[in-house]
């Protein structure tokens, strides 16, 4: 029998969706090993969070009332103490920016292997098979390990746990060494404000790495003008400073749901897709017929954007 | 102040490729400096230009073949490079986070930097875990997914912004010594100048074995075993418009009119 400990994620008073997905992933593993599912919620309004986390399949919820927001030292110390106390086989954490800020430290401190960004997990006795992507999603791999491990899961790969559970809620008495807390969060800032709100647009003409040069953006602007559409982009365009942050679609940018999303020279990395998959109709213009964007596109033109975009602009002039 | 930057040569894959066992066949692979590391190198070089850092050292774990890639960092302004390699590393199938942590921590011990910069992740295996794991191992502070670093580093504190999801940034103060994992977009990585490229050929590139670093050969034994690699099944039910640009553009134009969104 091997238990699972799932560590939930919250920010500024809200549990993040992946918390409920962790319960589903954790329950599946615990079922396979015949163990219990422990859920930990650390910092913030833990009692309120615990009530929300009490969904089907959770055996015990451990609340740790220490501070308001995420602090990786507090999380690292708490999770290692929970591991010592509960002796779970698997510690599950979200593959979020905060998950990656403490899970590797927990694994190293406990001398456990870590597998990150998993999209599927199969437990069989003492061994675990983790599925993850490599080369930006071009291939999937399976990796096997045995014994205890720290595992982070990708968001939106498991369904959210539902229903009302019957978990016992226990306050965990953590012993935080404040001297070892070497970082302090001083605030949060929303970025990407400004003149345009791309999440309000009906039609987005969205441009990616395939545009190659900053001056080539002109053909995208011309198309947007002709269509009366709004220009957005994938991450590399903003990283290059060619468009401001408020134009970025994706995990670290905006989530958009326009009527039509035209992805031009965008390969469709998972972080980008997370921000636009809710669009009503998705059109991809890309030279690579195997680009991941094709998996979610409704229509595609497999051709050079430098030929197609001007031709489309002409259609509307 | 001394800065150590971890860099990695990553494999790039062509659009069309074949898989042999648990690897992509050689002829479809290229090599490049990991994109995230390029930003980490740039940040370190800027800190040196601003007079905050005295020395920038890069470290990589990789075979001789990767020296050309690693010299890109020297061409952009790093002072010297360390490359860790030996037979036991050449034989290893997969270097997991624990193995990289152990090797890099030995380098940190020898170099004693005030600041270690790594990329958030490597573009090939994308574990995104080595930097934070390394920080824990060497007893340093850390910050993951940093997209802004104040260059004064006054009173031994790094003021950073961490890029959270959904367009939110976290403002954090981190005590030095620290490991920061650097996100793309934190700066604009420069192109190496011709002069820089020439100079890079003369800069020291020191090759060290595990033995030199005092790391046991067993450190490279991975607890993870790669058992399969395959192309993900396409869930695509995309309608592909065929024909020349004029034809496909007019199909798309028609769709936009149908949807009532075209002028």
Image: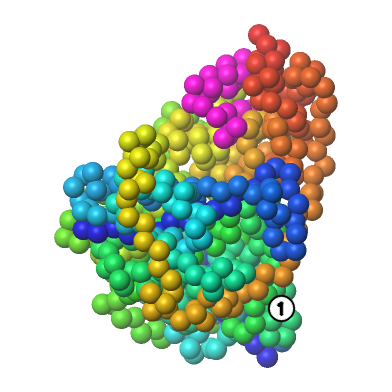
User: What chain is tagged by disc 1?
Assistant: A
Depth order, front residue of A107/A3:
A107
In x, y percent, where is residue A141?
Answer: 69, 63
Left or right relative to A113: residue A161 = right
Depth order, front residue of B123/A6:
B123
Identify the residue at horizontal 74%, vertical 81% (top origin): A124
Vertical placement of residue A26 versus B84, above or below:
below
Vertical placement of residue B249 versus A102, above or below:
above
Depth order, front residue of B226/A39:
B226
Residue furthest to the top = A317
Identify the residue at horizontal 54%, vertical 62% (top origin): B127
- Residue for badge 1: A123
Left or right relative to A155: residue A71 = left
Let me know if residue B225 appears in the view: yes
Residue A217 lies in magenta, yes or no? yes
Q: Is mark 1 on a helix, strand or loop?
A: strand
- Quadrant where the C terminus of chain B sits is top right
In x, y percent, where is residue A293?
Answer: 69, 41
Identify the residue at horizontal 75%, vertical 31% (top origin): A302
- Quadrant where the N terminus of chain B sits is bottom left
């Amino acid at each position: 029998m091997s238990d699972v400990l799932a560590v939930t994620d919250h920010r500024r008073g809200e549990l993040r969706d992946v918390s409920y997905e962790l319960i589903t992933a954790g329950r599946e593993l615990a079922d396979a090993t015949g163990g219990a599912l422990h859920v930990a919620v650390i910092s913030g309004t833990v009692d309120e969070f615990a009530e929300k986390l009490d969904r089907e399949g959770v055996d015990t919820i451990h609340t740790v009332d220490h501070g308001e927001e995420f602090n990786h030292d507090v999380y690292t110390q708490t999770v290692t103490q929970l591991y010592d106390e509960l002796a779970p086989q698997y510690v599950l954490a979200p593959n979020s920016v905060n998950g990656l800020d403490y899970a590797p430290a927990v694994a190293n401190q406990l001398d456990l292997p870590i597998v990150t960004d998993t999209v599927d997990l199969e437990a069989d006795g003492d061994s675990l098979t983790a599925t993850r992507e490599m080369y930006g999603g071009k291939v999937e791999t399976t990796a096997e390990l045995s014994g205890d491990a720290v595992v982070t899961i990708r968001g939106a790969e498991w369904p959210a746990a539902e229903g009302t559970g019957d978990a016992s809620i226990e306050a965990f008495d953590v012993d935080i060494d404040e001297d070892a807390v070497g970082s302090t969060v001083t605030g949060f800032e929303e970025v990407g404000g400004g003149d345009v709100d791309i999440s309000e647009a009906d039609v987005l003409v969205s441009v990616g790495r395939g545009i190659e040069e900053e001056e080539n953006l002109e053909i995208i602007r011309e198309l947007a003008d002709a269509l009366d559409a709004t220009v957005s982009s994938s991450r590399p365009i903003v990283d290059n400073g060619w468009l401001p942050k408020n134009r970025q679609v994706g995990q670290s940018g905006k989530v958009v749901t326009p009527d039509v999303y035209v992805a031009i020279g965008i390969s469709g990395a998972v972080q980008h897709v997370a921000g636009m998959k809710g669009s009503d109709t998705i059109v991809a213009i890309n030279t690579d017929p195997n680009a991941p964007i094709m998996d979610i596109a409704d229509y595609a033109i497999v051709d050079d954007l430098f030929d197609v975009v001007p031709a489309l602009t002409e259609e509307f002039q | 102040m001394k800065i150590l930057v971890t860099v990695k040569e990553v494999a790039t894959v062509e659009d069309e490729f074949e898989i042999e066992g648990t690897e992509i066949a050689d002829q479809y692979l290229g090599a490049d400096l990991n994109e995230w590391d390029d930003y980490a190198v740039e940040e370190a070089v800027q800190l040196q230009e601003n007079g905050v850092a005295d020395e920038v050292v890069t470290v990589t774990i990789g075979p001789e073949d990767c020296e050309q890639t690693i010299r890109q960092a020297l061409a952009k302004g790093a002072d010297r490079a360390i490359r860790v390699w030996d037979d036991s590393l050449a034989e290893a199938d997969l270097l997991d986070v624990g193995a990289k942590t152990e090797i890099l921590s030995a380098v940190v011990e020898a170099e004693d930097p005030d600041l270690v910069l790594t990329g958030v992740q490597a573009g090939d295996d994308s574990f995104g875990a080595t930097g934070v794991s390394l920080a824990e191992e060497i007893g340093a502070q850390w910050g993951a997914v940093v997209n802004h670093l104040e260059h004064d580093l006054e009173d031994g504190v790094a003021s950073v912004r961490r890029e959270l999801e959904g367009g939110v940034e976290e403002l954090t103060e981190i005590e030095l010594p620290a490991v920061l994992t650097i996100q793309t977009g934190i700066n604009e990585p420069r192109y190496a100048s011709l002069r820089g490229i020439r100079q890079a050929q003369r800069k020291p590139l020191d090759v060290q074995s595990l033995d030199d670093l005092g790391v046991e050969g067993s450190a490279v034994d991975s607890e993870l075993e790669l058992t399969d690699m395959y192309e993900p099944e396409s869930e695509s039910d995309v309608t592909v418009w065929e024909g020349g640009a004029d034809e496909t553009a007019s199909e798309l134009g028609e769709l936009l009119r149908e949807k009532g969104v075209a002028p």
